[in-house]
Amino acid sequence: MTSKYSIRNFLSFLEDPDYPSVGPHLKLLRCTGLWQSSVKSTLNRFKQFLFYVTIIFFFSQYIKSCIHLNPDSLKLILQYAPFHMGIIKSCFFQKDFKNWKRLIEYMSAVELKQLGAGYKNCDQVINEYIIRNRKVSYFFWALAFFSNFSIFSEPYQKNQVNVNGTSVYLNIFDGYTPFSKEPPGYYISMSIQTVLGHIVSAYVVSWDTLVVSIMIFFAGQLKITRIYCINMIEANNSTKSHHNIAECHEFHSALVENQYLFNALISPVMFVYLIVISVNLGLCIIQIAEIQDDLATLMSSVLFVVACLIQLLIFYWYANEVTFESTFVSYSTFQSDWPDSDKKVQREVALLSMKMDKVLEFKAGPFNKMSLATFVSILRASYSFYTLLNSTN
């Protein structure tokens, strides 16, 4: 019981009352330096410095692979592609920071207003989706931690020193470091790679869990929209009913507008991620198939693939949930007491139902809809890539 409550106390420390849904995610973003503070302290400047150092280090790997056309370097990039996605995610986040901030401030204002109003059903829905948000986020954080532990220890397990004096020392990333590829310079280089790798991993985790939490927010707010619509008709009070209908329309319009904004923010990143993860999964499966008599490497490789699949599934599951919930909003207008209202209010209910007949979708690029059907298609594409590479070996 004591350990249980100590964990709860620690997790409560991550909460921010000004941001009910995304409090822990903003604290992680502040820790990484991606959530820019108006205060120009020495610590914030150091975080920005680390951000630029990390970007330069990873870009040096891309430049090296292009100049020297080294297949091993390219293979290393593909093998640890989810880490490299952290560079894309963090750069896009910095580029669109003002829009991200506007979206998060909107979320905060909506939730604080609803919680302050004390509307019982709304409180219940908000608490339920925040609890789900935390379970997914903390599970994802734990999964990333254990995945990193296996990934960053894997090269040491594969290092070889042969009898004839030749040696093989493997890296995680092939970015430029001014040190030898053999000990003791190798260990200094690996230390730099490990530190920068953990920083990029924090970028990935903070971006991913923030995106998922916002998807959960939209799904929850669509449920609340349905509650508003069901209760919008006041018996024998046309003026109040008209006011409620106008509020429902305004609330739903703002929700749709911000969903479009959010989709615009994540769509380019998810498109790149869709391509990268399809290739990466195929490559990882080939490596797993080639492993013989190395249980530790097999376990770490399988854990990495499972983590990538879970990461992808979480995105597409909650994107699909938003789409699913949006299809019921229009019907909820006719669950109200509209038959007992006057004809003018009935016409307004019909118009509101037509206005709310919008299916909200998230897209990875201009063509790929984020849904469970698309997730299955990605798995098929990864398997096809695996069979193609396997047949060419």
Image (tube, rainbow, N blue to C red):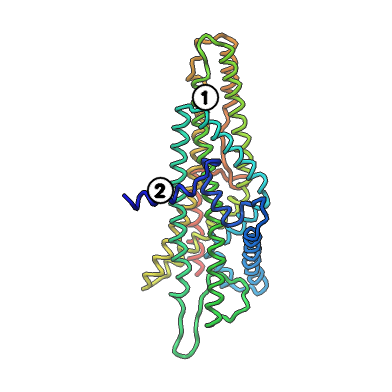
Query: What residue is shown with label 2?
Result: 8
Amino acid type at mark 1: Tyr
- Viewer-proximal residue among 37 and 238: 37
Image point (46%, 33%), residue name: 125
Q: Secondary structure at mark 1?
A: helix
- Residue type indicated by callout 2: Arg
Residue at position x 49%, y 84% from top?
A: 167
Q: Is residue 376 visible?
A: no
Residue 381: image location, x then y, percent: 51, 54
Q: Residues within 10 Å of mark 1 (few under 14, many from 20)?
A: many
Identify the element where label 2 is drawn: helix
Name which of mark 2 and mark 1 comes first in the sequence: 2
Residue 303, given in percent of the width and then of the height, sits at 42, 61
Residue 349 on image: x %, y %? 56, 18
Q: Which mark is residue 228?
A: 1
Q: Identify the residue at the far left of this view.
A: 1
Q: Is residue 236 left or right of residue 46?
A: left
Residue placed most toward the observer, 236 or 289: 236
The crowding category of the residue bearing disc 2, from other C-alpha atoms within 10 Å (few below 14, some 14 to 19, many at least 20), is few
Disc nearest the viewer among 2 and 1: 2
User: Seen in the image, is 312 located left or right of residue 35?
Assistant: left
Is residue 39 visible from the viewing direction of this image? yes
